[in-house]
Image (cartoon, rainbow, N blue to C red):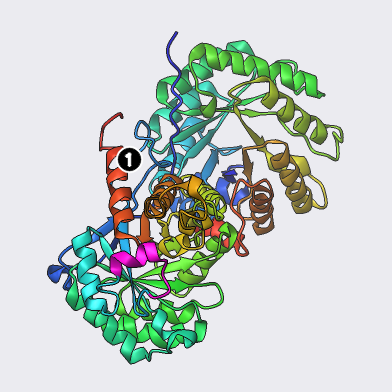
């Protein structure tokens, strides 16, 4: 009796999105990163193609790392007062991209001016050849003043800017269109809102192939399952042909790890949990690996050692082209 | 929902005139209008046109193929016309249709397998249309058995449980839904189900409303496809909405626009 063919064949695939531009492409990056292109659910090499492995970014924060958890801060404390040094160090640590978080522009964190933020962007671009992600403050009015200056400062570099939300997307969309950047569409763990936001962005002229979606993020043990299922359901829709859901996924997970008790509680508080340094590192690495298995293409992390571990683990299990099919 | 546009049919005066005067542009405009309105495939039926049926069918198919790669649903009961047509089709092809009698199935199913076409099979045999659920299920089982015997995949087989006008056969709409339900239960994998939808409201006053509500009810019962008027905007919207309510499409506030632009 023949073995039945149980392979799933989907009509859709995930869009391929490239971040960064080299000198020939009008920018100054020494490398670019392309994500997406999968034709099936993650890690099923016998039935789908995976042209690009997931990409890993490290966070550089304009407000420094004073409020970061000690186990992560200890890695970056030497460079945390200088975004240039920090960004250059990310390259050393093995990141594929740098994510510049503009926290210092937040009203509670110093209200750094739009021009100063734009200068930060320029300095980071000068300090590293990696492609750049720029993340706003999540305060709509601030973002609408700061981000347009930053997209201008990075014109030609094909960065990824975020985030656009359903109640605040027009300004960032217009800026990204004007300065040719990719855009992050953020809908908190809401797949229907995510789809709607993609329609709204398309209606103001943003190409669906220039969008990366951010379903927001919860760390392992802190709501990760909700985001996991959101990503998975969206991916099934995408593969089934829903063009509006075919955008790749970014998850900004580094900042979430510090919220989980198991990742931050000292060893003398919970001796049965073991060494804190190893726990904090593993918590971030394991969270990243789980998100890759959900279908995430771009991961933003804080702990450089966790990034290295997650990257190495994914390299070991990532389907090689033509391995089984 | 797989929507097969019904308008290229010689029963419509404009189509009959276009075929008889070989007005390709009129057919091509009708093809493109239906596709733009949401049709996934186009039914092509020469109807009561003058001239040889096979010549008219081949001319219609060529006219459609010049402007689209969309699947063509070759609509004829005559085997010789069907065979000539499917061999002339470059677009993906659906044979519409065969009856459920074994002798007919033994001719049409092998042709579908040989030419790589999908096939619509009606629950009609020499005794006519069954009056109840059981009759349809029996014929449906015959169709599935014959398809498996000849090697036609269930994903390539559409069963049409044949709907009759509600004004002359009021028990039939419920019987058709019952048959879809039962046939889905007894066959694994199940075939696809299609209806010539407009028949339900033939000669009724509220045609559009009847077709629209019945389509939504049938989608709920498991209908996968319909040969229908894709140019009826409210009918298309009912189909899309029914699929959203069954979570076959992902909801968002502008789900109609999302569906139309996602195709």
**Is A69 contained in the magenta span?**
yes
Where's residue B81, x and y in %?
49, 27
Above/below status of B36 relative to B118: below
Residue range of the region highlighted in magenta in the rendering: A66-76
Above/below status of A204 relative to A17: below
Image quadrant in which you'd find residue B6 = top right
Secondary structure, magenta segment, majority class: helix
Image quadrant in which you'd find residue A57 = bottom left
**Is A267 contained in the magenta span?**
no
Disc 1: which residue? A49
In the image: residue B188, left or right of residue A259? right
Q: Which quadrant of the figure contains the N terminus of chain B? A: top right
Number of other residues with Cα within 10 Å of mark 1, as a class: few under 14, some 14 to 19, many 20 or more? many
Where's residue A125, x and y in %?
22, 76
As drawn, the residue found furthest toward the front would be A268
Q: Residue at x 47, y 23 (%)?
A: B112
Where's residue A42, x and y in %?
40, 42
Q: Residue at x 55, y 53 (%)?
A: B38
Instruction: State the residue in front, A75 or A311.
Output: A75
In the image: residue B154, left or right of residue B176? left
Q: Chain of mark 1?
A: A
Secondary structure at numbered mark 1: loop
Q: Residue at x 51, y 82 (%)?
A: A140
In the image: residue A85, left or right of residue A318? left
Where's residue A308, x and y in %?
28, 52
> Can residue A202 be spotted in the picture?
yes
> Can residue B263 be spotted in the picture?
no
Q: Residue at x 42, y 88 (%)?
A: A110
């Amino acid at each position: 009796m023949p073995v039945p063919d149980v392979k799933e064949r989907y009509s859709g695939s995930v869009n391929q999105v490239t971040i960064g531009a080299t000198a020939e492409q009008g920018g100054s990056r020494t490398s670019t990163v392309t994500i997406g292109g999968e034709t099936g659910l993650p890690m099923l090499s016998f039935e789908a193609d995976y042209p690009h492995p997931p990409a890993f970014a490290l966070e550089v924060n304009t407000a420094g790392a004073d409020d970061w958890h000690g186990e992560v801060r200890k890695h970056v404390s030497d460079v945390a007062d200088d975004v240039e040094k920090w960004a250059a160090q990310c390259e050393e640590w093995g990141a594929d991209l740098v994510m510049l978080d503009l926290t210092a522009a937040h009203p509670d964190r110093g209200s750094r001016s739009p021009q100063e933020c734009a200068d930060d962007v320029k300095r980071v671009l000068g300090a590293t050849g990696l492609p750049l992600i720029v993340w706003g403050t999540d305060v709509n009015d601030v973002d609408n003043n700061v981000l347009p200056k930053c997209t201008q400062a990075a014109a030609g570099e094909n960065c990824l800017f975020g985030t656009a939300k359903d109640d605040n997307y027009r300004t960032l969309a217009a800026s990204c269109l004007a300065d040719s950047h990719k855009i992050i569409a953020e809908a908190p763990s809401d797949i229907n809102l995510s789809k709607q936001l993609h329609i709204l962005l398309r209606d103001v002229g943003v190409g669906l192939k220039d969008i990366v979606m951010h379903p927001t993020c919860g760390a392992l043990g802190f709501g990760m399952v909700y985001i996991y299922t959101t990503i998975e359901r969206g991916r099934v829709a995408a593969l089934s042909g829903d063009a509006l859901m075919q955008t790749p996924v970014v998850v900004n997970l580094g900042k979430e790890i510090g919220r989980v008790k198991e990742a931050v509680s000292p060893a003398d508080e919970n001796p049965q949990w073991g060494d804190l340094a190893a726990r904090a590192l593993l918590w971030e690495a394991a969270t990243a690996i789980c998100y890759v298995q959900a279908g995430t293409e771009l991961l933003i992390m804080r702990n450089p050692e966790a990034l290295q571990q997650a990257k190495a683990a994914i390299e070991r299990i990532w389907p090689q082209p033509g391995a089984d099919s | 929902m797989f929507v097969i546009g019904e308008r290229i049919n010689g029963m419509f005066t404009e189509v009959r005139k276009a075929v008889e005067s070989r007005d390709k542009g009129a057919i091509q405009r009708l093809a493109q209008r239906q596709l733009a309105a949401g049709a996934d495939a186009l039914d092509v039926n020469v109807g009561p046109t003058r001239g040889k049926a096979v010549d008219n069918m081949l001319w219609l198919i060529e006219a459609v193929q010049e402007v689209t790669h969309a699947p063509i649903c070759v609509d004829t009961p005559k085997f010789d016309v069907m065979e000539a047509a499917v061999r002339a089709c470059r677009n993906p092809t659906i044979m519409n249709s065969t009856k459920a009698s074994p002798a007919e199935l033994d001719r049409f199913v092998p042709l579908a397998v040989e030419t790589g076409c999908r096939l619509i099979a009606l629950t009609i045999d020499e005794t006519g249309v069954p009056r109840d659920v059981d009759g349809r299920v029996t014929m449906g089982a015959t169709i599935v058995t014959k398809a498996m015997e000849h090697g036609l995949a269930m994903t390539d087989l559409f069963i049409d449980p044949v709907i009759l006008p509600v004004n002359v056969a009021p028990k039939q709409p419920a019987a058709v839904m019952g048959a879809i339900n039962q046939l889905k239960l007894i066959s694994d994998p199940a075939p696809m189900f299609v209806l010539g939808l407009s028949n339900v409201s033939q000669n009724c006053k509220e045609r559009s409303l009847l077709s629209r509500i019945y389509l939504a009810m049938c989608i709920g019962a498991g209908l996968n496809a319909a040969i229908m008027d894709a140019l009826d905007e409210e009918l298309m919207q009912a189909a899309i909405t029914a699929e959203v309510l069954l979570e076959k499409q992902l909801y968002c506030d502008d789900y109609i626009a999302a569906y139309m632009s996602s195709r």
